[in-house]
Image (cartoon, helix red, strand yellow):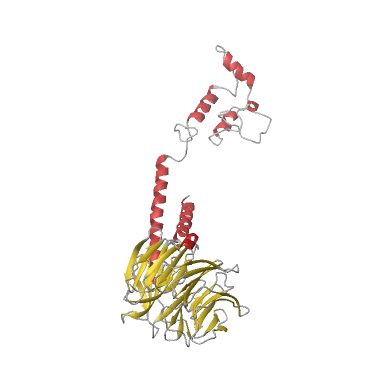
Amino acid sequence: MDQSKKRLVQSDGYSPRRLHDSLTQYEFPGDRFIPNRSLMNLDQAHCLLTNKTKEVHNPNFGKGYRELLRQSLTLDSEGRPFRMLVFRGSPKSRRRFNYVIDEMRRDIDAEALSNRINQHESRRLPTKEVRVLDAPKIKDDYYMNLMDWGNNNVLAVALGSALYLWNAVNQEVKRLLEVQGDNDYPTSVAWSENARSLAVGCMKSKLQIWDPETSKCIRSLGGHQRRIAAIAWNGHTLTSGSRDRSIINHDVRVGNSLTSRVRAHTEEVCALKWSSEGNVLASGGNESFIHIWEASKMSSSNFLHRFNAHNQAAVKALAWCPYQFNVLASGGGTGDGCIKIWNIRKGTCTHRVETKAQICGLEWNRHHKEILSGHGYGDSSIQNHLCLWKYPSMTKVGEINRHERRVINLSQSPDGLTVVSAGGDETLRFWEIFGPPRVENSASDFENLLSLKTSLIR
């Protein structure tokens, strides 16, 4: 075999670098499918194409060479027919890869479900509080809202005629104010969203806004004739509810602050909660009614919904779900003792659980799908307890009984890990009951595991 044939056979099996001897050294390989004129002897080719009787003798274009060339173009290195431009992954192999991915998804789903179950089963209620503070002279009154934990990590609590601030970072205690006058004292407190202002409602119908930094009253608002048991902030709007059965919205930016007054409840307004989006207000009354108000329509006094489902018992406990914006939880007083979950968009009750005890407070867990209830008078098996419920099944996770008298109020820390309960036994008890939070949600875990396993297969 001459040198030209040797070069063809010893090539990579797909495309020889040159088909004839040449003094030129090319930096790129020739392509056997697309002719390259610089690699051809055109005169020789023309002679071969036009001369049918006379065979041209050339050592580079003999019969042996042409046979080897034909075999190289039509057969692969193992002698099988060579197919050009064929997708390397057959439909069968693609189906197998999809099958592998489906198997991985099932495995990961099962693993994620198992992790979630184990994580939930591993959550146990604390057997005791992490901190206990004395709260002398705190009013043991079901209708009042005497405590609020602000976004500045400062807890405001009313004790008798005075209001105190407890800093959760350095544990410092500061007396912010003391209400002057006979039988007058704070009956409701609420931090603004930016925690720069603290609103205080009083027994004798005063409503004030205080600056916690300077310890000065910066605004007094009128409009009520009797005690103010519930207040709530919504941006620059301060909403107050009173025993005079009215709800008032104040725009604290302007001098004439009263923007709307509604009077739908037939007895004292003892609960007010704005939704996290600030477009809907829920109000609870002593006559067992819950009213749902659209912020844009409150001036017309037309409510969106009215629920009368707590068996003629007062509704003080209201809480909006942090991960389902149209879901509201409510709790009834002594004559009812039920927790109910409402779909505000549809105006229906979706869940109901009987606790057999007065419900004084509700707090949603922001890290797990759970809700905590604080209880007062009722069945001795749950009286004065804290109870944790799964959502949406509303099955009981567990309960804590450390207060000697009923739980008056509940409030939650800014990070959502700690809950404080105020009891009629004149104590504040702090519970690490809602944590720890999940580091990543299951969807992120699934994507990370899928990406890792896919890369390993490929």
* Residue plotted at (38% across, 58% down): 346
Compared across the picture, whether 108 is left or right of 277 comes to left
Tell whether 15 sits left or right of 117.
right
Q: Position of residue 219 (x, y in %)?
A: 59, 75
Residue 119 appearing in the image: no
Count how many numbered circles sit on residues in the image.
0
| In the depicted structure, whether residue 106 falls above or below residue 391 | above
> Quarter of the image holding residue 178?
bottom right
Q: Nearer the viewer, residue 86 or 201?
A: 201
Q: Position of residue 232 (x, y in %)?
A: 50, 71
Query: Viewer-proximal residue, 255 or 192?
Result: 255
76 over 325 or under it: above or below: above
Q: Residue furthest top?
A: 53
Q: State left or right for residue 284 relative to residue 22.
A: left
**Residue 122 lies in what quarter of the image?**
bottom left
Q: Is residue 26 visible?
A: yes
Q: Is residue 254 above or below residue 173?
A: above
Front residue of this view, candidates 332 and 34: 332
Could you say where residue 273 lies in the image, as x and y percent from the top left? 46, 69
Residue 121 location, x and y as percent? 37, 70
Q: As rendered, which of 6 and 68 lies closer to the eye?
A: 68
> Residue at the spot x=55%, y=81% of the render?
165
Quadrant assignment for the N terminus: top right
